[in-house]
Image (spheres, rainbow, N blue to C red):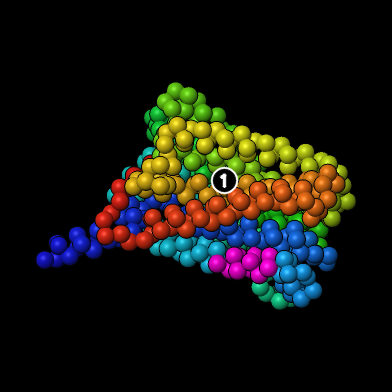
Amino acid sequence: MSTLRTTSQSSVQPAAVQHYSPLYFLASLGAGGLAVTFFMYLMFWVPHPNQPVPVFEDLMAAFGSGNPALKLAIATAMLGIAFFVFLNVKMLLWNFAALSRFKQTEGYTALRKTNGETTLLAAPLATAMTINGGFIVGLVFVPQLWSIVEYLFPAAMVAFVLVGLWAFRLIGHFLGRVLAEGGAFDMTAHNSFAQLLPAFALSMVAVGLSAPAAMSGNTVVVGVSLVLSTFFGVTAMLYAAYASVTAFSSMLMHGTAREAGPTLMVIVPLLTVLGIMMLRQNHGLHAAFDVHGAPAETLILLARILTIQIVFSLLGLLVMSRQKYFSDFVFGDKLSPGSYALICPGVALSVMLHFFINKGLAGAHVIDKFSLAYWALTALALAFQWAMIVLVLRLNRQHFKANPVARAAVPAE
């Protein structure tokens, strides 16, 4: 009787419980990224003359005196931020509990001996995103936060450094094993961009560390922010360069691992995060150290980043369409935790388009802000955002809703 009951209970467990992988931290990451897309409404549409980012007081002033469209945008943004930050934190906590249980299994021991060990970097990646999301919540919902923000910046940098050290510890264990032990790294299983996950985690730490450089009025804080964010950002670039070159060589020899198809587009969120880091650093250099850059230089920087993102997006879509990834893993009966990696490129393109339109095109006076051309381009950013919202809700339903009949699942690697 007990055996029958156990079998019945396990058959209705969600796929994420039955086949847990650290890649499910990407569900938390995706929700946090969507909160950022809603913050773009406030960042670029709401006037905030007294500080570089909008705060609660700016939103209330605009809501009280703005036109109906602006009021609707503010209300939508605030609701979107609240919902997706809640989902971000909820999924982060669920993953920590699931990871704790997973560590007691033989599957975890086996994972630490394979290329898939780097999937553990999804945990510090999602945690760094949650810290960023918490700061957005503070700006949007906490009155008078800006009056104490200079006390928060050092605390935030400490938090990001701790997450960075956590990421370095995981990377060190992986690299120490594969570089010290011959044959410990399987090149035939390196036929994707999955090994760029550590670089993505370090870049998320870097962009968080760069925030004080753009927002603090204290020269020491700005300087520390510039140095620390540069350290983690450059390290992320080096790791990404090594991992992508070796992975591309393996893909040419063995083809792209079908389940890891979405990783071909991990370059897209990686560049968005590093691009925002560079913009923040440039603002800090201008405000604190009187180093000036021309708006046209920002336009070219963002255009180059966007070009690379489009190229890798097209490459990823080409390979996944040839391998029928979407028909199996998104719309079909096969479930893969790596499907959550599809959210990051769409979110990243939405955010980068907002920056390209506002800081690039409008900043260099190529187009007028709030003109017809402005809104036509912004519609693309909004389309990516809402498509990713639909994708998140669909994947959550597939992976986290208990089904009487367990659907076919694919192992993490």
Q: Amino acid at mark 1?
A: Pro
Quadrant hosting residue 215: bottom right
Q: Write the residue at 30% across / 59% down.
A: 403
Q: Write the residue at 61% across / 51% down.
A: 383
Against 254, residue 68 (above or below) is below
Main secondary structure type of the part rendered in magenta = helix
Pick out the residue farthest to the left.
1
Which residue is nearer to you in this view: 251 or 235? 251
Q: Is residue 284 left or right of residue 34?
A: right
Does residue 149 appear in the picture of this structure?
no
Residue 291's spot in the image, x, y percent? 86, 47
Residue 315's spot in the image, x, y percent? 55, 33
Quadrant hosting residue 67: bottom right
In the rendered image, the quadrant that contains the N terminus is bottom left
Check residue 154 for magenta coloring. no
Does residue 171 appear in the picture of this structure?
yes
Q: Write the residue at 23% across / 63% down.
A: 9
Which residue is nearer to you in this view: 33 or 412? 33
Against 256, residue 268 (above or below) is below
Against 196, residue 141 (above or below) is below
Check residue 77 for magenta coloring. yes
In the rendered image, the quadrant that contains the C terminus is top left
Residue 343's spot in the image, x, y percent? 52, 50
- The magenta stretch spans which residues? 72-83
Residue that label 1 marks: 345
Residue 297's spot in the image, x, y percent? 82, 40
Could you tell me which secondary element the residue under label 1 belongs to? helix
Category of crowding for the residue at label 1, using alpha-carbon neighbours closer than 10 angstroms: few (below 14), some (14–19), many (at least 20): many
Q: Is residue 363 left or right of residue 340?
A: right
**How many numbered callouts?**
1
Q: Write the residue at 55% across / 29% down.
A: 245
Which residue is nearer to you in this view: 185 or 67? 67
